[in-house]
Amino acid sequence: MQPRSGPGSAMPVVLIIDDQVTNCHIYSRLAASAAADVRTKPFLDAQRALDWLAQNEADLIIADYKMPKMDGAEFTRRLRKLPDYADVPVIVITSYDDRDFRLDALDAGATDFVLSPIDHYELTTRVRNLLELRRHQLLLKTRARKLEQELERSEQSRDKLLLDSREELAQVIDTVPAMISAADISGKCIFVNAPFAAMAGTSVAQLAGRDAAAAFGEVFAQRSRDLDRVVLETGQPFRDLEEEIVDCDGTKRVLLTTKSPLRDATGQKIGVLTTATDITDRKRDEGRLRVMALTDPLTGLPNRYALRKQLRTELARSRRGSGDFALHFMDLDRFKAINDAFGHQVGDKLLGLVATRLRETMQQGETIARLGGDEFAILQPAVQGRDDAANCARRVLAALEAPFACQEQSFSVGASVGTTLYPQDGDDADEILRRADLALYQAKAEEPGTFRLFDADMDLRAREIMAMEVGLRTALERNEFVLHYQPQLDLRTGRISGVEALLRWKWTGFGLVAPGRFLPIAEKSGLMASINEWVIRTACAQAAIWRKTIPGQVRMAVNISPTQFRSYDLKKIVVSALEETGLPPDLLELELTESILFAANSAEMLREISNLGVQLSVDDFGTGYSSLSYLKRFPINRLKIDQTFVRHLDTDVHDAAIVKAVLHLGRSLQLRVTAEGVETAEQLHHLHQAGCHEIQGFYFSTPLPAAECEALLRRTERDPFRVPAEVEAA
């Protein structure tokens, strides 16, 4: 690489490295606007940039951290190994979440970093300042070269030229924003610049001929002398040493120091040149970054990364004999419904209240962390067996039983806990974390609001879940999904007025899989959108066939979950299915959970679907966050009483009162009401007496394949169902 002939002899060059073309254009434009005559050289590939730099020169480099093949830190390390690029400024661009990446880039030798998305003014200012610093660096090098040339030309004027050049050099280095000093072999000061003297609280003249480092205390001076001796003995520079000093104002500062040998014209070592940059602000920012990297910003609790660090520490202690420990994973049971219904502001406030209550219940030595979303973890040291761990899990569950008062609302969230113990359940951090997650999954699957200790069978179930996920991804292609249909009986006519389409999976090689086993896996795997579209299209096609072949009008009901409602354009799918099958819109009913009514923009979407003529019903009515002020705003046609109220209808006066209230509400709002989960004659009696319109449940029919359901439809058309005399007389 050919050096420049002098400062200002060429336009400053700013190298831009980012694998995104748009970013390259933006950074180039901002860099070009930082100062006059700035040239930019963009690269999409870090290795190509290094190859170019080996033959050319740049005054400033702007590099993105996250790049394929070579990240910003590795690029900076390789750059610093190139000749003449030890001090070229480097700006690394990282995002707000990449705290560890920023530290890595700085350790690799980056001069500065800018957070993405970038502030245009900030980037332009930093480019301008660093180009000015680079101009001073080049000026200093040019002066040094000029001094060398002049000394060679005239031996007679050597002393005078040396004196003049030193004066010129002193003027230059006084403008450099760094502490620069030079000491001879005996340790006496040859020269210092103005920033060094200002930091020491004295003048350049007073430091001349003395041990300049002694101005910052004997301890610092002795360390500086020792390093100078190493540089003189080895002839090699000593780079990037972090040192602490106390300046003349008593302020503690951190310096990044480089020491290099000074040589005369014959190459003999005559002293040591020391350059120190004040990085106090940068170190303070790094400290803040480290705290931020370990802290959850919403709750102030340690985050997942901090938990991993603490877990590794606890593993090391336990292996040294400090005792066993337990890890508890906790997940709030009803948080998602609250967050969907009332918004993220309420959800975030609620998470903060949960964190506060968990802090209050923690015992000495225990660590609580927020893993993300509504997931928390508790690290319990010095555990005395499984009972001790179980007691901690019970304590956590008990702490969350009382409702939370949040923004004039009262919320009961509850929680589930999964617990694993060291060393019984794993001997490394990843295994312990994985098995705690498995135990939590099992607790939520079996009975939300409880805890489960890990056992070996959970690993088998986890492998089964993985196998099911793989199978689900090809189930549509293999035509393994089928629909069964559960009739809804009109108690006044005795005929079937509608059916509910229920999904079943005939897994090749494994047989029929219950929906409760595979639907949660499908939802977590992001497969529900395509599955639900298949259900709507298939159900509409079957309803269209029955409309042509069976007397009477049979309504087809399809469940829509909140996740499905948000994840894709429901109206578009419904319109397409109706057009393809020719099914009249009023024969399709979408069953909605109550939380959908509270979701953002749901009212507009539901009105558009209702305007098509499609029927809408509220499924599991009474189990969510029902509000009459919300209910009357939506174009609802039907309420479905949840089976939890029907199950004990004949024995629980509270359930009976709730059912009567829903029926009265339906009549008042002119809504049809269907009772789900009707399994006994006693339940049918109570519903019949209370004036319920429709029933659905095993008492009348289980979910049936299409052919069997069609046969039942034909039979009830010919011979309508009649409420048994013993039911009426009960």
Image (tube, helix red, strand yellow):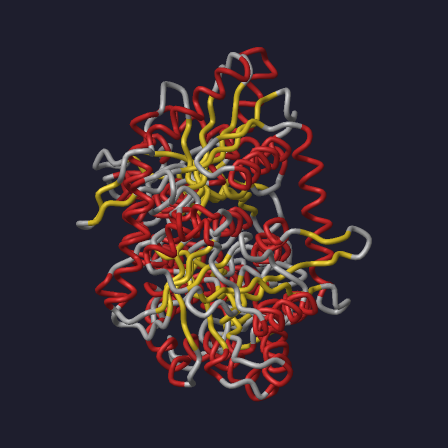
Question: Could you say which quadrant of the image residue 20 lies in?
Answer: bottom right
Picture coordinates of residue 224 (x, y %)?
A: 45, 32
143 to 6, vertically: above or below: above
Picture coordinates of residue 655 (x, y %)?
A: 33, 45
The residue positioned 49% from the left and 15% from the top of the image is 382
Of residues 316 and 177, the one nearer the viewer is 316
Q: Quadrant of the N terminus?
A: bottom right
Residue 364 in sight from this viewpoint:
yes
Q: Residue furthest right?
A: 509
In the shown orientation, is residue 622 left or right of residue 110?
left
Of residues 206 and 468, the one nearer the viewer is 468
In the shown orientation, is residue 568 left or right of residue 617?
right
Residue 181 in sight from this viewpoint:
no
374 to 435, vertically: above or below: below
Count of all numbered marks drawn on residues in the image: 0
611 to 83, vertically: above or below: below
Of residues 474 and 259, the one nearer the viewer is 474
Picture coordinates of residue 648 (x, y %)?
A: 40, 42
Picture coordinates of residue 259 (x, y %)?
A: 50, 42
Q: Residue furthest left?
A: 408
